[in-house]
Image: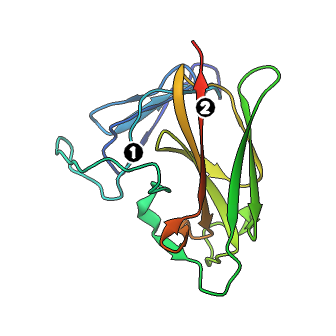
Amino acid sequence: MRKGFKLGWAIREAILAGIAIGCGAIAVPTGLIHASTSTSLRYAHEGHSHSQPHEAGSTHSHPPHSPHQGAHDHEHGMLEIPAGQPVPTVELVIHPDARRGWNLEIQVTNFTFAPERVNQTSSFQEGHGHLYIDGVKITRLYGNWYYLESLAPGTHEITVSLNANGHEALMHNGQPIQATRRITVQP
């Protein structure tokens, strides 16, 4: 794509938050997000998504999620690890990059990243991760490393959840399998 080209995509749900991608992204009442083609990522506003679409102009509210509720992606359901099976674990290590941003290291046990099987039959031992910043899903993770170029000044909560091939959140004893770390960005 050529520099400065704008693209938009429809979303299924109301957005109370925006993620700034490149020169800027905004949540607009029409349900479109506009973003530049730059690859930098800047956090714009806290919020989360809902699984059910809402009519334009309608309102919807409920208590905010606690950070311990985890994998804010309700639309794909949950997959409980069966009793007696090895339970996947995930740890998140945030390494400052030598030049700019952060390198996120996702350490897993009893779990294999399997991007070649995304959208196929779910297994509780393989799949992908979801990356959230302040409760907003940013992307899928298909491996153990992710480069996060930039964040707005302030304290941010970074969460990685483990998800099955069918995108279900992996759960153990009713809790999502995820790791959360906080990072403070100076102005």
Q: Residue at x 22, y 48 (%)?
A: 61
Q: Is residue 6 left or right of residue 74?
A: right
Q: Is residue 79 left or right of residue 109?
A: left
Q: Is residue 46 above or below residue 58?
A: above
**Comparing labels 2 and 1, the label whose residue is closer to the camera:** 2
Q: Where in the figure is residue 117, as x and y percent of width and height?
A: 70, 69
Of residues 172 and 43, which is closer to you in this image?
172
Mark 2 residue type? Ile
Q: Where in the figure is residue 89, as x and y percent of width and height?
A: 69, 64
Residue at disc 1, secondary structure: loop
Of residues 125 and 84, which is closer to you in this image?
84
Which residue reaches farthest top? Answer: 187
Mark 1 residue type? His
Q: Is residue 9 above or below residue 40?
A: below
Q: Residue at x 69, y 48 (%)?
A: 92
Check disc 1 and report the residue beneath it: 48
Q: Where in the figure is residue 67, as x and y percent of width and height?
A: 46, 48
Quarter of the figure with the C terminus: top right
Q: Is residue 63 above or below residue 79?
A: above
Of residues 151 and 23, which is closer to you in this image?
151
Which residue reaches farthest left? Answer: 58
How many numbered discs, if any?
2
Quarter of the figure with the N terminus: top right
Tell me whether circle 2 and circle 1 mark residues in contact (CB < 8 Å): no
Check disc 2 and report the residue beneath it: 183
